Amino acid sequence: NINTLTEDSETYIGIYGVLAQAESENISANIKWGIRKRMQNGTYTNSSVPFGYSLENHLLVINNQQAMIVADIFKRYLAGESISKIAQYLNNTYPKETGVWQYSSVQLILQNETYKGDTRYQKHYTANLFPTKVSHNRGQVSQYYIAKSHEAIISDEDFDKVQSLLKMKAPHKPKVAEKLFQKQKQDVDADKE
């Protein structure tokens, strides 16, 4: 029974809007709390299923056809192939129904501990309710790691070897302090000449 033509009605609409917003934020906080509690006790089921697995009865189960491709990716990388070459090989040998294999998708597979049978929750998190923005978790919120939560496609040893190779091949990005120090050193050297 709000008449939007009167001034009092605008006040009521504003109050109702504030109450609805507060209720929405409260529901969101309660849902996040519930999800984190399930992550802590290991009963949380992720809605997104990584390539190589299917979700059956809230459990990750190996998809044999996709798992063969995942194992091939790891084998090729351990044999010395670059990620770009592997992506090119996948596009020729195992073309996707939608989209293409990209460098980043192959790299994510190689870095994902899911393939050795472990689960890490909260790799990403939503910082704010409005605007909703998903960010990479670098310690802002707790992460939960569950070892051997499902059947592995890759052995622990092969996964660890791949992680070592990825670190070794990663381009070194100098930190800001290193760049500043190098610039100051160059300035000092120039003054000496």
Image (cartoon, rainbow, N blue to C red):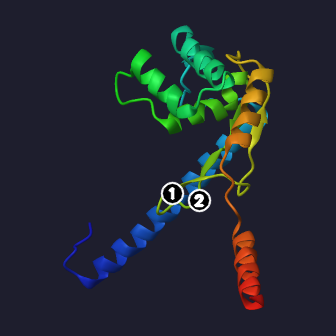
User: Which picture quadrant has residue 135?
Assistant: bottom right
At label 1, which amino acid type do we have? Lys
From the viewer's perspective, is residue 137 above or below residue 19? above
Say whether residue 37 is visible.
no
Horizontal arrangement in the rendering, residue 126 relative to residue 157 (left or right): left
Residue 165 coordinates in the image, percent (x, y): 72, 34
Task: Say which label, 1 or 2, has the lower sequence index.
Answer: 2
Which quarter of the image is occupied by the C terminus? Answer: bottom right
Between residues 13 and 40, which one lies in front from this camera angle?
A: 40
Q: Which residue is mark 1?
A: 133
Say whether residue 137 is visible.
yes
At label 2, which amino acid type do we have? Ala
Which quarter of the image is occupied by the N terminus? Answer: bottom left
Residue 189 coordinates in the image, percent (x, y): 76, 83
Between residues 52 and 79, which one lies in front from this camera angle?
A: 79
Do callouts 1 and 2 mark residues in contact (Cβ within 8 Å)? yes
Q: Secondary structure at mark 2?
A: loop
Numbered label attached to residue 127: 2
- Judged from this view, the residue extending furthest toward the front is 193
From the viewer's perspective, is residue 56 above or below residue 82? above
User: Which picture quadrant has residue 186?
Assistant: bottom right
Q: Secondary structure at mark 1?
A: loop
Numbered label attached to residue 59: none
- Judged from this view, the residue extending furthest toward the bottom is 191
Residue drawn at x 56%, y 27% as measured from the top left: 50
